[in-house]
């Protein structure tokens, strides 16, 4: 889990940038401050302080502010004109504002040093700052806009060239023309050499970190990063095209329970052994909602036994699940017979079991212990064992996914939890009395909550099943797991309601994983409000109770294109290793380049 956690946590660096007008106003204000502070540091006692502030401020706006605003507009036009992505005008203006601010800090520090050593290093400070923002802009354009290095390097020149050109023009027109020759020579030669040194260090760094991706996965790290940002900012699914060459076709299972009245199917409970990931709206991340919406009746899509290895590479792969379920529904045989809901436990494993016609459902949870996904092979073992033990045709295995902490581990073959599951299935009493069944349904998108609170598009879905006077609430949140302890808090909160049993589940949707937290389980915030939704959903489902017949099904999904066991692990480990190595390589390369550039500019003569 630690590897996945570190990768998912990278999403916290994707933030919403300010609108264009705020960046422009910020550049005007900050450039005024840069100029004013520079003049005040070099203050001549006989001059007016207010005059120095105003004169310096206007100088700062002209040299730094106007040129940076111009570069913000030009950068966006150049990148867009050359078919780059992601760089909207607000992004470009913010980048220019950030670069200008950084340059201003260096200039002011240079003025302070000049004041102490009684030597003018203003020009060298500005050159040093311009080289740094050139490298920074080049890095941003190259890594986020899906353009070639040469285009990024040329576009990165726009802001520093405009600033240096304006500085030279103002110096020529208003300050001193006697040193124009030396000034131009210094600017040109020092800037060219320093820029080449710094940008080559950036090129070397990116080349080093890109190598593992190309070698291990056959994909370009810059394409991956650019399209990932496009997805986070715009919802673009172009990133799925990167995944396609590394995909692996698998066969997996989908199981379901169908409840019908005389008018047709009333509700459908599906448990696909397909993982709703990787994140955002990519691949199968929104599968629980997309799949449920493909059916005209109330549909709950629970989390079947599967890990990130079984993430569909594209949204279109969900069609295969839909078609498989619909084909299976045509074969279902119905009867009015069902058993009561019964709980069993062994060590950490806890299950809730209910028999429907010739099938059964097993709701599996390790709460209050924290455990993540149940691997498909473990799920198959549970299916086979329960079918044999209980003499049923179908066994619907559900990973309730309702007890989370950041380092929760998956349930993999060889883990102690696997044997706990085997032991608890052995305890199931297959000789349960069966009676007629009633079902009531209710769904609510939970409009007052959103992804920030860990709530996906489908909100909450509740199905109350009544058998022989016992009412059991199946509560499903469209969320990626549940904060540890919140499940029990919900169970305690509904004890006085007209139900006898309840199990709380999450779909494990990864659409909520696009925020500051790499993982975003329900229950971190607004627990009281969420519990009220649960209570309302149970009451509404009870009011909807009516007699039904029930049938179950198990179908094989063939040729589902997923990340696959090898590529999924390879992707996560490659990203994790690159992040770890970058923490060492980046400082070494960039600090070395900075030192060389610093020495060249400040002590290189000319």
Image: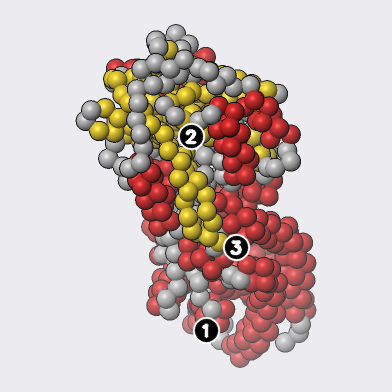
Which residue is under mark 3?
102
CA–CA distance in space, label 2 to label 1: 90 Å
Any part of residue 346 in sight: yes
Mark 3 vs mark 2, CA separation in Å: 68 Å
* Mark earlier in primary sequence (3, 2): 3
Q: Which residue is mark 1?
A: 172
Helix, strand or loop status at disc 3: helix
Q: Earlier in the sequence, mark 2 or mark 1?
A: 1
Residue 56: x %, y % from top left: 53, 65
Asked where in the image residue 478 lies, by quadrant, the reply is top left
Q: Nearer the viewer, mark 3 or mark 2?
A: 2
The quadrant in which the C terminus is found is bottom right
> Viewer-proximal residue, 193 or 532?
532
Residue at image position (47%, 15%) is 433
> Do labels 3 and 2 touch, CB within 8 Å?
no
* Residue drawn at point x = 29 percent, y = 20 percent: 547
**Of the pair 121 and 374, the residue shown nearer to us:** 374
Residue 185 x, y percent position in the rendering = 63, 89
Q: Is residue 485 visible?
A: no
Against 391, is 574 above or below? Answer: below
Mark closer to the observer (2, 1): 2
Query: Dot 1: what SS?
Result: helix
> What is the CA distance from the residue labelled 1 to the residue labelled 3?
25 Å
Which badge, 1 or 3, comes first in the chain's sequence? 3
Can you identify the residue that label 2 sits on? Answer: 393
In this picture, residue 149 sits left or right of residue 206: left
Q: Is residue 205 left or right of residue 504?
A: right
The single residue placed furthest to the left in the displayed view is: 263
Classed neighbour count for the residue bearing mark 1: other residues with Cα under 10 Å, few (<14), some (14–19), many (≥20): some
Tag 1–tag 3 contact (CB < 8 Å): no
Left or right side of 47 for 435:
left
């Amino acid at each position: 889990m630690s590897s996945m956690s570190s990768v998912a946590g990278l999403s916290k660096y994707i933030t919403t940038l300010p609108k264009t007008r705020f960046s422009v106003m910020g550049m005007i204000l900050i450039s005024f401050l840069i100029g004013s502070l520079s003049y005040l540091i070099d203050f001549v006692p006989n001059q007016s302080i207010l005059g120095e502030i105003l004169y310096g401020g206007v100088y700062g706006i002209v040299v730094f502010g106007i040129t940076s605003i111009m570069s913000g507009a030009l950068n966006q036009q150049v990148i867009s004109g050359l078919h780059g992505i992601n760089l909207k005008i607000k992004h470009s203006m913010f980048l220019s504002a950030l670069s200008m601010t950084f340059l201003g800090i260096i200039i002011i520090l240079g003025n302070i040093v000049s004041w102490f050593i009684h030597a003018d290093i203003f020009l060298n400070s500005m050159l040093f700052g311009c080289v740094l923002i050139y490298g920074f802009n080049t890095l941003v354009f190259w890594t986020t806009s899906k353009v070639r290095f040469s285009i990024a390097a040329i576009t990165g020149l726009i802001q520093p060239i405009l600033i240096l050109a304006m500085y030279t023009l103002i110096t020529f027109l208003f300050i001193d023309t006697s040193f124009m020759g030396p000034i131009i020579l210094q600017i040109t030669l020092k800037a060219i050499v320093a820029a080449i040194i710094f940008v080559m260090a950036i090129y070397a760094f990116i080349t080093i970190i890109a190598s593992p991706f190309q070698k291990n996965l056959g994909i370009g790290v810059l394409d991956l990063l650019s399209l990932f940002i496009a997805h986070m900012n715009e919802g673009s699914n172009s990133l799925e095209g990167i995944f396609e060459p590394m995909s692996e076709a698998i066969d997996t299972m989908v199981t379901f329970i169908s409840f019908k009245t005389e008018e047709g199917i009333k509700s459908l409970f599906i448990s696909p052994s397909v993982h709703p990931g990787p994140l955002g709206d990519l691949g199968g991340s929104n599968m629980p909602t997309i799949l449920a919406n493909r059916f005209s009746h109330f549909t709950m899509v629970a989390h079947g036994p599967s890990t990130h290895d079984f993430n569909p590479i594209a949204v279109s792969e969900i069609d295969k699940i839909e078609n498989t379920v619909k084909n299976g529904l045509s074969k279902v045989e119905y009867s009015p017979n069902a058993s009561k809901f019964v709980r069993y436990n062994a060590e950490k494993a806890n299950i809730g079991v209910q028999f429907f016609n010739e099938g059964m459902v097993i709701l599996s949870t390790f709460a209050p212990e924290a455990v993540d996904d149940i691997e498909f092979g473990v799920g198959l073992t549970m299916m086979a064992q329960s079918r044999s033990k209980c003499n049923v045709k179908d066994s619907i295995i559900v990973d309730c996914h309702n007890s989370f902490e950041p380092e929760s581990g998956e349930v993999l073959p060889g883990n102690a939890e696997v044997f706990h599951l085997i032991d608890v299935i052995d305890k199931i009493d297959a000789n349960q009395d069966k009676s007629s069944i009633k079902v009531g349904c209710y769904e609510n998108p939970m409009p007052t909550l959103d992804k920030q609170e860990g709530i996906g598009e489908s909100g909450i879905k509740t199905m109350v099943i009544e058998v022989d006077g016992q009412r059991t609430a199946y509560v499903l949140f469209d969320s990626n797991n549940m904060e540890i302890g919140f499940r029990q808090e919900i169970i305690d909160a509904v004890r006085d309601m007209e139900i006898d049993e309840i199990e709380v589940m999450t779909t494990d949707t990864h659409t909520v994983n696009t925020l500051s937290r790499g993982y975003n389980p329900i229950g971190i915030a607004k627990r009281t409000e969420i519990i009220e939704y649960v209570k309302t959903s149970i009451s509404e489902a009870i009011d909807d109770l009516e007699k039904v017949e029930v049938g179950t099904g198990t179908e094989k999904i063939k040729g589902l294109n997923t990340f696959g066991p090898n590529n999924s692990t390879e992707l996560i480990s490659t990203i994790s290793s690159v992040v770890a190595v970058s923490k060492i390589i980046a400082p070494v390369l960039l600090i070395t380049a900075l030192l060389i550039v610093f020495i060249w500019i400040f002590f290189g003569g000319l």
